[in-house]
Amino acid sequence: MAESGTLPTGFGELEVLAVGTVLLVEALSGLSLNILTILSFCKTPELRTPSHLLVLSLALADSGISLNALVAATSSLLRRWPYGSEGCQAHGFQGFVAALASICSSAAIAWGRYHHHCTRSRLDWNTAVSLVFFVWLSSAFWAALPLLGWGHYDYEPLGTCCTLDYSRGDRNFTSFLFTMAFFNFLVPLFITVVSYRLMEQKLGKTSRLPVNTVLPARTLLLGWGPYALLYLNATVADATSISPKLQMVPALIAKAVPTVNAMNYALGSEMVHRGIWQCLSPQRRERSREQ
């Protein structure tokens, strides 16, 4: 961790400023778009459906990622971590819960869309609520394990934000990484890819696809894949073999996922898009109520 007024090892003044600025832009864009999505659900009755509950869960998770990025941005611009070791553990836990919930919520949405569009039965409230509870309880469970000794949270190379510590590369880290990655990255990615592929096969030949079936899987793979590769490399090689600047790239890419998700799931949905505009335009909301 960088001391007050000093630069982290491997970073120059402009590089620290650039990382902090990028994190700040990502945090503010993700927060603003996802908060608008959450408000649209709260204020638009048409959006209070089981399928949209899964999108709301994703928006809440992505808001958590953006809040985590905002703390990291502030610390980066200060060039130090001002919250101590306990704050680092809390920051790592909160960010990990939000990240896992975002990944699993994306998979739940994919399955929910397949169920909604390709089966004869609609997604009901009991199933949707159970999915949301499972996503968040599972995410909290896996994120709590490093606090209990399986895995460990520590500072990123910049020293101004905290995440899963991959610098050790020991058996403890390796066993946790492979188990966690299987259940929280590979399985959700598989569910997402298969669900949208089945939708394409069933609906693509007879009608226009109702949702984007390509972007969600690509977002999961490209948004979180670099982190997976960084962690995987730490299990087979010394983490210091990768420069500190390059080690920060996966974090910057992942922090952009909330913005991409909001544009895909919220702005890309006509109903959610309309709900957001109703939140931004009180007069329009009043006219829709009168109608």
Image (cartoon, rainbow, N blue to C red):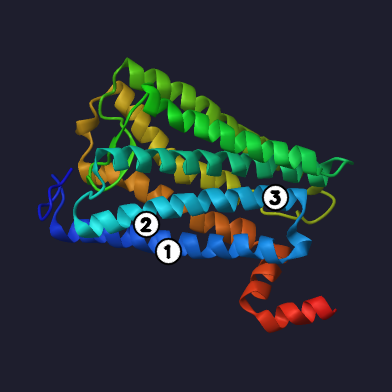
Can residue 200 be seen by looking at this rendering? Answer: no
Q: Residue at x 58, y 44 (%)?
A: 217
The reply to whether dot 3 and dot 2 touch (C-beta < 8 Å) is no
Upstream in sequence: badge 3 or badge 1: 1
The picture quadrant where one finds residue 211 is: bottom right
Q: Secondary structure at mark 3?
A: helix
The reply to whether dot 1 and dot 2 touch (C-beta < 8 Å) is yes
Q: Position of residue 32 (x, y in %)?
A: 50, 65
Can residue 94 be seen by looking at this rendering? Answer: yes
Q: Residue at x 19, y 55 (%)?
A: 79
Quarter of the image for the N terminus: give it. top left
**Which circle marks residue 28 in the picture?**
1
The picture quadrant where one finds residue 89 is: top left
- Please, which residue is most extreme toward the right here? 120
Q: CA distance from mark 3 to mark 1?
A: 23 Å
Decide if residue 99 is on the left or right side of residue 277. Answer: left
Query: In the rendered view, would you say 170 is above or below 233?
Result: above
Disc 2 marks which residue?
70
Q: Position of residue 23 (x, y in %)?
A: 34, 57
**Which circle marks residue 280 in the picture?**
none
The residue type indicated by label 3 comes to: Leu
Q: Position of residue 173 (x, y in %)?
A: 35, 22
Disc 3 marks which residue?
53
Decide if residue 47 is on the left or right side of residue 228. Answer: right
Decide if residue 197 is on the left or right side of residue 57. Answer: right
Instruction: Categorize mark 1 by other alpha carbons within 10 Å: few (<14), some (14-19), many (20+).
Output: some
The residue type indicated by label 1 comes to: Leu
Name the foreground residue: 199 vs 171: 171
The residue type indicated by label 2 comes to: Leu
